[in-house]
C-alpha cells in the first residue's frame, strides 16, 4: 500500500493564532475503468446525467461514520468495485460499490481514497454535487466519534472550501434527505431512500462550531442551521 503525504498549510483563523498543517495520506481505493463505467451508469439512471466522465463540481460536504470500528475494515468496505452481497438494501439501485473521497481514522489521521472531483456513491440524491467524508466508528449506531476526528474534519472542511469555492453546504448524512425537492437534489427514483443517523448531531454541532466563520449552510430543515 502506497501512502503519499500531502501537506497543506492552513491559514490562521479569523480569531488569530498560528497557522497549522493538514496532512492527508493518499490511499486510493480500486477505481478501475469498470467502476468508472458503473458510476456513469448510476449517474445516468438516477440523475439523468449522460456524460463521458464522472467529474463533479462540489457544492457541499457530507460527513458520515462508517459503522465499522477499525481503519482496515472501513477501507475494505469501499475498496471493491461492485457492491458486496451484504448491501442488498441498495443493490437494486445499481451495482457500483459505495465510495467516499476521504476517510478519517479515530486518531484524526486523514486518508484520501479517490479524487474529490469524481462522483462517489455515498449520499442518495446528492452524489453528483458532494464530497463525502467518512469517519471510522459508529458501530451499532453508537455515537463514539472522537475529539480528534472533530478537529480533523473541521480542518479538512476548511481546506476543501478553500480549494473549491463552489462549496456552500456542510451537512451530516442523516440530514441528506432534507434536500428532497431542493434544486440540488437529483434522485429520479422516488422509491430509493434509506434512513440514516450518521454521524450524529453532537458530532455535526462540534464540527460546525469549529468552522462557523466559513458561513456554510446546513440542510434546509436542520434546526439551528441556515439554508
Image: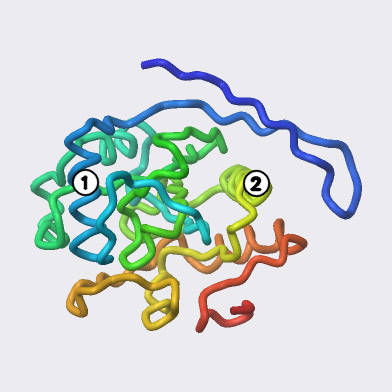
Inter-mark Cα distance, 2 to 1: 29 Å
Which residue has dot 2 on it?
A: 151
Q: Left or right: where does residue 3 sit relative to residue 147?
A: left
Residue 24 lies, with reference to residue 190, above or below; the image says above
Outermost right residue: 16
x 33%, y 51%: residue: 67
Q: Left or right: where does residue 187 sit relative to residue 171?
A: left
Which residue has dot 1 on it?
A: 97
Q: Which color scheme does this rendered protein use?
A: rainbow
Residue 202 lies, with reference to residue 119, above or below; the image says below
- Which image quarter: residue 193? bottom left
Q: Secondary structure at mark 2?
A: helix
Assign the N terminus to one quadrant of the image: top left
- In the rendering, at what x and y percent does residue 84 appear? 13, 44
Which of the two discs, 2 and 1, labels the residue nearer the N terminus? 1
x 39%, y 34%: residue: 71
Assign the C terminus to one quadrant of the image: bottom right
Q: Left or right: where does residue 171 sit relative to residue 209?
A: left
Which-is-in-front pick, marks 2 and 1?
A: 1
Q: Which mark is residue 69?
A: none
- Which image quarter: residue 35? top left
Q: Residues within 10 Å of mark 1 (few under 14, many from 20)?
A: many
- In the rendering, at what x and y percent does residue 68 appear? 33, 45
Residue 82 lies, with reference to residue 145, above or below; the image says above
Of residues 70 and 225, the one nearer the viewer is 225
x 22%, y 59%: residue: 44
- In the rendering, at what x and y percent does residue 180 appear? 37, 79
Of residues 76 and 148, the one nearer the viewer is 76
How many marks are shown on the rendered structure?
A: 2
Q: Secondary structure at mark 1?
A: loop
Q: Left or right: where does residue 119 sit relative to residue 50?
A: right
Q: Are marks 2 and 1 in contact (CB under 8 Å)?
A: no
Amino acid at each position: 500500500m502506497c501512502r503519499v503525504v500531502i501537506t497543506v498549510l492552513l491559514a490562521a483563523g479569523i480569531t488569530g493564532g498560528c497557522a497549522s498543517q493538514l496532512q492527508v495520506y493518499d490511499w486510493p481505493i480500486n477505481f478501475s475503468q469498470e467502476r468508472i463505467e458503473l458510476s456513469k451508469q448510476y449517474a445516468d439512471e438516477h440523475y439523468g446525467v449522460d456524460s463521458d466522465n464522472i467529474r463533479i463540481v462540489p457544492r457541499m460536504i457530507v460527513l458520515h461514520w462508517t459503522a465499522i470500528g477499525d481503519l482496515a475494515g472501513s477501507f475494505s468496505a469501499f475498496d471493491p468495485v461492485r457492491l458486496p452481497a451484504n448491501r442488498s438494501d441498495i443493490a437494486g439501485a445499481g451495482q457500483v460499490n459505495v465510495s467516499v473521497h476521504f476517510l478519517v481514522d479515530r486518531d484524526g489521521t486523514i486518508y484520501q481514497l479517490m479524487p474529490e472531483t469524481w462522483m462517489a456513491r455515498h449520499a442518495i440524491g446528492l452524489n453528483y454535487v458532494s464530497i463525502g467524508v467518512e469517519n471510522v466508528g459508529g458501530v451499532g449506531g453508537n455515537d463514539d466519534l472522537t475529539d480528534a476526528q472533530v478537529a480533523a474534519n473541521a480542518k479538512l472542511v476548511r481546506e476543501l472550501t478553500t480549494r473549491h469555492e463552489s462549496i456552500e453546504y456542510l451537512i451530516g448524512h442523516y440530514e441528506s434527505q432534507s434536500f428532497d425537492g431542493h434544486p440540488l437534489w437529483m434522485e429520479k427514483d422516488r422509491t430509493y431512500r434509506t434512513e440514516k443517523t450518521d454521524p450524529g448531531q453532537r458530532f455535526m454541532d462540534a464540527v460546525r462550531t469549529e468552522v462557523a466563520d466559513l458561513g456554510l449552510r446546513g440542510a434546509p430543515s436542520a434546526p439551528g442551521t441556515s439554508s
